Amino acid sequence: MPQTSRTLSPHFQKMQIEMELRGLSPQTLQQYFIPLRLLEKHFDKPAFEVSPDELKQYLYHRIKSGISNSSLNISCSAFKLFFNKVLNYNWSDDVIIRPKRPKKLPYVLSQNEILAIIDQLSNIKHKAILLTTYSSGLRISETLSLRVSDIDSENMLIRINDGKGSKDRLTVLSIKNLKLLRRYWKLYRPTDLLFPGPIEGKPLSARNIQYVFSSAKQKAGISKPATVHTLRHSFATHLLENRTDLRTIQMLMGHSNISTTSKYIHLSTAHIASVRSPLDGRDPNA
């Protein structure tokens, strides 16, 4: 959670207000403060005293130190908000330079591979979490935030409340997953959170589920560098291979832009394999 206003400098208090006005999640608020704190530590002075040249120097230093592209992207977003919206410095993109993101395709697991991983689990709660994540195309944070009331078995839908970008949406509820969820409910009897953690009112840790998934993947003999998030990519890719249209997949995934959804065309081997080369499409008698 973000720090209280009592522990923040006036400029950081304004930063927090700007973020809350934009409806950013508490997690994003925390992520935006981290690069600003690191910037202050690097130059040993308040962030508002950092010059444009110093900021460019700092970004270059971070790139050379091996910072991940996602972390660098968060840093640039935080700096743009702080220097341009809070301080009104209006620094251009030539100062806060956001490097191009490498266009790497994510890995996808086949349905047989996913079921093989889930079969390695003896804990029905872990099985239900992973099967729900895959069969409904959820982010792990969305799965762990589900409440019992979000499962609409009458209409075979799952309601996602306050997903990424603070958006609500509906997604599909698998018949097979519903059967597993009913077995799970009879054992655990959750009343509010569907997958509560050891602390009352708090969900399970996503890190814990990542470890469970990684261990089960290893036991299943699957060497692909897949994570729990791979289940979401696999859901969208498998829908595409089952001839679900992109617009529907976009809605189920909660993507703001259909270009984000379009990447699954590149992941679908069935879709690519169905395309004929223009050479083979020629009339051999022509």
Image (cartoon, helix red, strand yellow):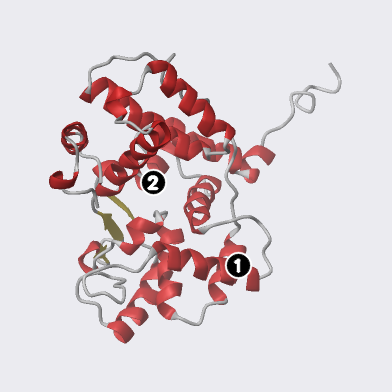
Q: Is residue 40 above or below residue 94?
A: below
Q: Categorize mark 1 by other alpha carbons within 10 Å: few (<14), some (14-19), many (20+).
A: many
Q: Secondary structure at mark 2?
A: helix
Q: Is residue 55 above or below residue 38?
A: above
Identify the mark at residue 253; answer none if there is no mark.
2
Count of labels in the image: 2
Q: Position of residue 243 (x, y in %)?
A: 51, 45
Return the residue found at the far left: 6
- Residue at image location 36% in from the left, 71% down from the top: 178
Looking at the image, which is closer to me, 13 or 278? 13
| Residue 75, image quadrant | top left
Q: Earlier in the sequence, mark 1 or mark 2?
A: 1
For disc 1, the marked residue is 217
- Between the C-alphas of marks 1 and 2, the distance is 24 Å
Query: Looking at numbered disc 2 in the image, what kind of residue is underneath it?
Result: Met
Q: Mark 1 vs mark 2: give the one in front.
A: 1
Q: Secondary structure at mark 1?
A: helix
- Residue at image location 35% in from the left, 80% down from the top: 184
Return the residue found at the far bottom: 187
- Residue at image location 54% in from the left, 57% down from the top: 227
Q: Is residue 59 left or right of residue 15?
A: right
Q: Position of residue 212 (x, y in %)?
A: 50, 70
Query: Looking at numbered disc 1 in the image, what kind of residue is underneath it?
Result: Lys
Looking at the image, which is closer to me, 118 or 244? 118
Q: Categorize mark 2 by other alpha carbons within 10 Å: few (<14), some (14-19), many (20+).
A: many
